[in-house]
Amino acid sequence: MCYAGGGIQPYAIPGADLDPDGVISAANSLSTGGGSVRDAGADVVGKWRGLGAHYEAPESGQLFTVMDPVETNARTFGDAVQQVATVLKAYAEEIRPIKASLDAVRRDAYAFRDKIASNSE
């Protein structure tokens, strides 16, 4: 509650803990991680397929295709993580002006309380 006990409580005005830069930093880390997962999945499957030049057996066809879903799933997951990062970055930019407005209201509320306190003396 921003108003209690007969006066404005500036500390209760929300938004002080909003951290757009922190959200962007976390989103960048997520994006990097998503790309790493996608690339690692493709790399593992590529190396797995390379074994075909050195391994021959009746089941080799089945053995080399068993890893195909890894590449697809790693790509899907990595892309999804990067989409989440994109949305988080957009969120951070949306809250940036809101945080600035709430910070200004909080500063004004403190100034108002100080002015009232100095006038009552």
Image (tube, rainbow, N blue to C red):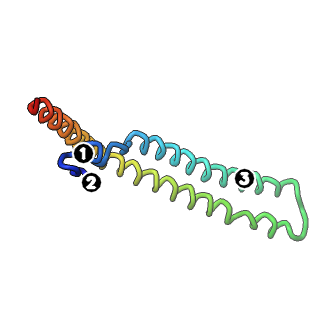
Mark 3 or mark 2, which has the lower sequence index? Answer: 2
- Residue 112 coordinates in the image, percent (x, y): 14, 37
Residue reaching furthest to the left: 119
**Mark 2: amino acid:** Met
Query: Nearest the camera: 110 or 22?
Result: 110
Proximity of marks 3 and 2: CB atoms separated by less than 8 Å: no
Q: Which mark is residue 9?
A: 1
Mark 1 or mark 3, which has the lower sequence index? Answer: 1
Quadrant of the drawing holding the C terminus:
top left
**Mark 3: amino acid:** Val
Query: Nearest the camera: 28 or 58?
Result: 28
Look at 39% across and 48% down and name the residue there: 89
Q: What residue is disc 3 on?
A: 44
Which mark is nearer the camera, 1 or 3?
1
**Residue 49 in which image quadrant:** bottom right
- Residue 54 coordinates in the image, percent (x, y): 87, 54
Relative to residue 54, is residue 97 depicted above or below?
above
Proximity of marks 1 and 2: CB atoms separated by less than 8 Å: yes
SS of the residue under disc 2: loop
Relative to residue 13, is residue 112 depicted above or below?
above
Look at 86% across and 70% down and name the residue there: 59
User: How many residues crowd around disc 3 within 10 Å: few (fewer than 14), some, or many (20 or more)?
Assistant: some
Q: CA distance from mark 1 to mark 3?
A: 57 Å
- Residue 109 coordinates in the image, percent (x, y): 19, 40
Q: What residue is disc 2 on?
A: 1
SS of the residue under disc 1: loop
